[in-house]
Amino acid sequence: ALLGLIGRGVLAGARTLASADARLETGTTRVFTARAPASAVAGLDAQLTRGVDALAAAARRLGVVARRPQTGQLHTYFAQAVVALVVLATILVLVR
């Protein structure tokens, strides 16, 4: 009984959302009946997609680079610290 009640509620909600989606689709179709605005929006969408894809690829590469020096071997951490200190000292000497 409870499961049937939940099922009927979910179906009613799905029907409501489907009709709202149909009305929204009809309204947006009327707004973009001219080809120029639609192609401009499509071009903007393509640019935005390329930008998001490039940002995701950069984040992926940074993740790979960040994991690379994590070897678990203590001597590599000491070597990295020495290199970082030498770079920092060089920068401090050049700035002054």
Image (spheres, grey):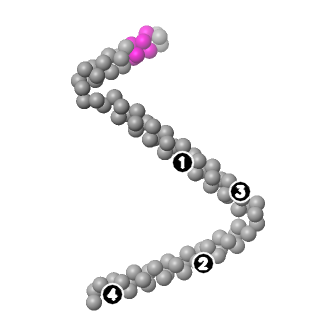
Q: Is residue 65 magenta?
A: no
In this figure, which residue is indicated by the disc labeled 2? 23
Q: Amino acid at mark 4?
A: Leu
Q: Residue at x 25, y 30 (%)?
A: 72
Q: Whole-Å distance between the Cαs marked 4 and 3?
A: 47 Å
| Vertical relation: 86 (above or below) 40 | above
Residue span colored magenta: 87-93
Q: Residue at x 65, y 74 (%)?
A: 27
Instruction: Name the N-terminal-most of marks 3 and 2.
Output: 2
Q: Is residue 78 visible?
A: yes
Q: CA distance from mark 3 to mark 2?
A: 23 Å
Residue at image mark 3: 40
Give the residue at x 54% y 78%: 20
Q: What amino acid type is highlighted by mark number 1?
A: Val
2 or 1: tag closer to the N-terminus:
2
Quarter of the image with the N terminus is: bottom left
- Pick whichever, 9 or 95, lies toward us: 9
Q: In 3D space, how far apart are the residues under numbered discs 2 and 1 (Cα atoms)? A: 30 Å
